[in-house]
């Protein structure tokens, strides 16, 4: 049995900790011109329950807790629009060679960090090498790079040992810091070249983070200042929104988000994530019954997904029933797979009997859940109907992300962000994948993953992706029951923001309400 805490596991831990969203990408484009004039007078105050654990982007994988503020102070090479399209950031053009192993990035001229040093090709190389050499969760995105070179002040080439189909997408969440702080100083004080500057003098970590518009940024600021109030309790955040203390609040608890929407606040959903059971012990290492695909399929049939989503995840208005782990925006998505395993206790019981487990068996599972412990109790009840006795272990909530992926539990309630198909594949498929703590190996899945990676056309790549998706669903690696979107709730009289985004929130793209 393998028990690992690798960089990949840490990345997945970050996703579990915050329901993050491996697609947490810098998104959108501020409505500005060629340079900030500093004439914006409106201010923006947001409430969010997270703040950066530190300011070193390569060390932090939890982009729901850090990305809001990173997107203010740091630039990125590209951005992801609310529609999911890659758009220019620091890089204005990018292209691969015919082998898809050499990427060329053309940068804007004359950009400066707030410490007065240039944000040029050398700085980009230093940052990409910093990500590559770090022990942080995003080092995996740089593992296949053999060389990063500054050809001149505005041109960078990245050479790979093999194609990396999602690397450009991932650059939208690769934040560029001043090289002067990459040695460790970035952990406590950010130095970037982004749309805003961190105001350390007036900020109170754990309570209030303050930012002022960067007059040297290449796009106009929509707000003269942004204040992030750290409010961990969702009810308190909603109260702050109602009282006008904040203009927008990140409300992850579906009932409170719905309450805010009912009160007339604008709901802005973003960056979808999935929820469901990850069946880690697919080889039956610790729980032999789970090594039989019929038992794993029975678990899928036994879960009343619609009831779970309605009771604990805000209903089907905020959670879409699904059986697959790939984003609906990805080329691996297949709508037909969402019709697999309809709720059917009789069929589940038949499969249990066929597999030789008519009398059931016992499994342990963590009882804690970000949606409340009622959801795990409902799962235990549903599985109990087909003879699977679920023992719910209650632990310190802070330990849930680590324990979920420690290999100690054969199944776990999981949530992870829906990003590019290749990101999902490297997270899920292969003995070293982050969401594979028991090191399960599947030859067919590996073949299809390789076919996707080395496909020479978009059609061939999509075909391989859909085939892999079909294989994972048919083999019941997961009992996925919903894809949902977390939400900001905003005062429509003071701020305008995208209401349905495929990317993570990018605050500089928000505008004062007209």
Image: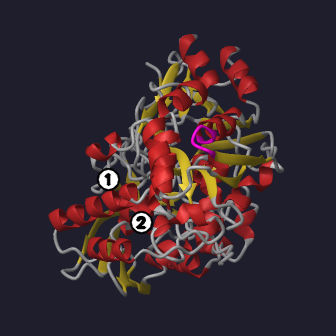
Quadrant into which the C terminus falls: top left
Residue 486, visible in the rendered structure = yes
- What residue is drawn where x is 80% and y is 39%? 207
Residue 238, given in percent of the width and then of the height, sits at: 68, 22
> What span is colored magenta in the figure?
383-387
Residue position for label 2: 425
Residue 58, visible in the rendered structure = no
Q: On screen, 32 above or below 330? A: above
Secondary element type, mark 1: loop
According to the image, what is the colour scheme of the structure?
secondary structure
Q: On screen, 483 above or below 62? A: above
Residue position for label 1: 330
Residue 370, given in percent of the width and then of the height, sits at: 68, 40
Q: Nearer the viewer, residue 18 or 55?
A: 18
Q: Main secondary structure of the magenta part?
A: loop
- What residue is drawn where x is 44% and y is 35%? 343
Query: Which one is closest to the eye, mark 2 or mark 1?
Result: 2
User: Would residue 6 appear left or right of 418 to someone viewing this image?
Assistant: right
Which corner quadrant of the image does residue 177 belong to? Answer: bottom right
Residue 15, given in percent of the width and then of the height, sits at: 60, 54
Say few, some or many: other residues with alpha carbon within 10 Å of mark 1 (under 14 / 14 to 19 / 20 or more).
Answer: some
Q: On screen, 146 above or below 461? A: below
- What residue is drawn where x is 49% and y is 66%? 427
């Amino acid at each position: 049995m393998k028990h690992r805490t690798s960089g990949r596991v840490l990345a997945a831990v970050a996703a579990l900790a915050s329901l993050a969203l491996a697609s947490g990408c810098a998104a959108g484009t501020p409505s500005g011109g060629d340079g900030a004039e500093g004439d914006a007078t409106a201010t923006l105050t947001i409430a969010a329950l997270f703040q950066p654990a530190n300011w070193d982007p390569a060390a932090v994988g939890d982009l729901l807790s850090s990305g809001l503020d990173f997107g203010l102070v740091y630039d990125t090479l590209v951005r992801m629009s609310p529609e999911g399209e890659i758009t220019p950031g620091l890089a204005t053009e990018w292209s691969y060679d015919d082998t898809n192993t050499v990427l060329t990035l053309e940068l804007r001229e004359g950009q400066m960090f707030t410490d007065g040093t240039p944000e040029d090709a050398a700085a980009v190389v230093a940052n990409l090498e910093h990500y590559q050499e770090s022990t942080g969760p995003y080092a995996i995105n740089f593992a296949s790079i053999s060389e990063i070179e500054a050809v001149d002040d505005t041109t960078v080439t990245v050479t790979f040992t093999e194609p990396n189909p999602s690397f450009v997408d991932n650059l939208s969440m690769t934040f560029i810091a001043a090289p002067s702080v990459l040695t460790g100083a970035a952990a406590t004080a950010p130095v970037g070249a982004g749309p805003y500057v961190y105001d350390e003098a007036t900020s109170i970590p754990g309570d209030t983070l303050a930012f002022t518009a960067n007059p040297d940024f290449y796009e106009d600021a929509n707000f003269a200042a942004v204040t992030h109030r750290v409010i961990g309790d969702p009810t308190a955040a909603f109260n702050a929104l109602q009282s006008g203390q904040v203009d927008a609040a990140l409300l992850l608890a579906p009932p409170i988000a719905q309450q805010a929407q009912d009160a007339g606040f604008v709901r802005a959903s973003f960056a979808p994530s999935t929820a469901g059971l990850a069946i880690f012990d697919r080889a039956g290492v610790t729980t032999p019954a789970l090594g039989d695909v019929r038992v794993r399929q029975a678990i899928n049939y036994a879960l009343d997904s619609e009831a779970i989503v309605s009771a604990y995840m805000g209903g089907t208005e905020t959670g879409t029933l699904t059986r697959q782990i790939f984003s609906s925006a990805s080329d691996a998505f297949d709508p037909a797979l969402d019709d697999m395993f309809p709720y059917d206790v009789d069929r589940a019981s038949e499969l249990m009997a066929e597999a030789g487990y008519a009398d059931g068996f016992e499994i342990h599972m963590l009882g804690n859940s970000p949606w409340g412990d009622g959801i795990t109790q409902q799962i235990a009840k549903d599985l109990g109907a087909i003879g699977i006795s679920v023992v719910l272990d209650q632990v310190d909530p802070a330990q849930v992300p680590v324990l979920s992926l420690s290999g100690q539990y054969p199944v776990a309630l999981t949530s992870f962000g829906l990003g590019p198909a290749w990101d999902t594949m490297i997270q899920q498929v292969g003995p070293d994948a982050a969401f594979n703590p028991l090191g399960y190996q599947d030859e067919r899945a590996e073949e299809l993953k390789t076919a996707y990676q080395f496909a020479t056309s978009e059609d061939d790549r999509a075909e391989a992706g859909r085939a892999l998706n079909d294989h994972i669903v048919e083999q019941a690696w997961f009992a996925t029951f919903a894809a949902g979107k977390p939400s900001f709730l905003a005062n429509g009289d003071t701020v305008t923001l995208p209401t349905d985004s495929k990317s993570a929130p990018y605050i500089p793209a928000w505008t004062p309400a007209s």
